[in-house]
Amino acid sequence: MVESEGKTAILRMPVGSDITLDAPRSQTSVAYQAIRADILRGHHVPDKKLKILELATELGVSQAAVREALSRLVPEQLVISRDQRGFVVAPLSLADLTDLTDFRCEIEAAALARSVERGDVNWEADILAAEHRLRNLPKDLPEAQMRETWMSSHASFHRALVSACGNQRMLALHAQLYEQSERYRGLMFHVQTNRNLDDEHHGMLQLALARNADALVELTVAHLRKTAEIISTAFGHQTTED
């Protein structure tokens, strides 16, 4: 609980969030993480107007904290600030997906090559563990929870692959691009394909352990572009239906 404008307010934590109140946090930090998580999970849909008063009431923080949190999300391209019109969730588009995928492939390729060169036995162990968890998810979870669990394990696997690159700025950019891609991924779950993601991920694991950087980069880039292709198809279907 925090004191907000003379009243005791209860902070709403997003489902599945890592946000806790075990350590002191400013209202701005809590608002930033909660709004950010809701955008990435699709709870705040593209082009939605983010009303400061409503968010402040929902999260139990001050309006100033929400305003600052939204401003922090603008450079991450998750929120757009429009003169005299406040803040809106950044829109999704095929053009943006193409740009995002192209840039992500470049960063992924560089980070993978560096990790293969620099990775040690702990890096190998982390990749093995992440791939094992991704391949062996519980089968009896509700659909929504299963999707959340898969997405979390999937992110952990791709993060493990590049974790030995040795460049913190590259890792931060890699994480940011990955999260922005997740906003599009929700569209993919509604498209039926015969794709075997387990085999694709296992192939990446094998190439990483074999220290075959060129083949690993080629397979991973193809993996990312295939995902973008499926999302593009889903995006087109959604646009037609709308």
Image: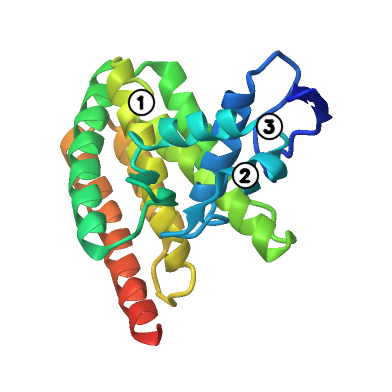
Horizontal side of 17 relative to 215 (left or right) equals right
Task: Find residue 68 and report its horizontal and vertical position in percent.
Answer: 49, 29
Decide which of tag 3 and tag 2 comes sooner along the chain: 2
How many tags in the picture? 3
How packed mark 3 is, by other alpha carbons closer than 10 Å (few <14, some 14-19, many 20 or more), is many
Q: What is the C-alpha distance between the residues marked 3 and 2?
A: 10 Å
Q: Amino acid at mark 2?
A: Leu
Image coordinates for residue 116, horizontal then vertical, percent = 27, 25
Compare residues 73 and 111 and report the one nearer the observer. Answer: 73
* Front disc: 3 or 2: 2
| The label number, if any, that marks residue 53 in the structure image | 2
* Residue drawn at 64 percent across, 24 percent down: 27
Q: Secondary structure at mark 3?
A: loop
Residue 1 visible in the snapshot: no
Location of mark 3 (residue): 61
- Which residue bears the numbered disc 1? 172
Could you tell me which quadrant the C terminus lies in? bottom left
Q: Image quarter for residue 196?
A: bottom left
Circle 2 crowding by C-alpha within 10 Å: few under 14, some 14–19, many from 20 = some
Q: Residue at x 54, y 32 (%)?
A: 32
Q: Position of residue 232 (x, y in %)?
A: 29, 69
Spot occupied by residue 35 in the image (x, y as percentages of width and height): 56, 41
Looking at the rendered structure, the secondary structure element under dot 2 is helix
Q: Is residue 160 above or below residue 26?
A: below
Q: Name above or below for residue 193 compared with residue 64.
A: below
The amino acid type of the residue labelled 1 equals: Ala
Element on which disc 1 rests: helix
- The answer to whether the residues at label 3 and label 2 have Cβ atoms under 8 Å apart is no
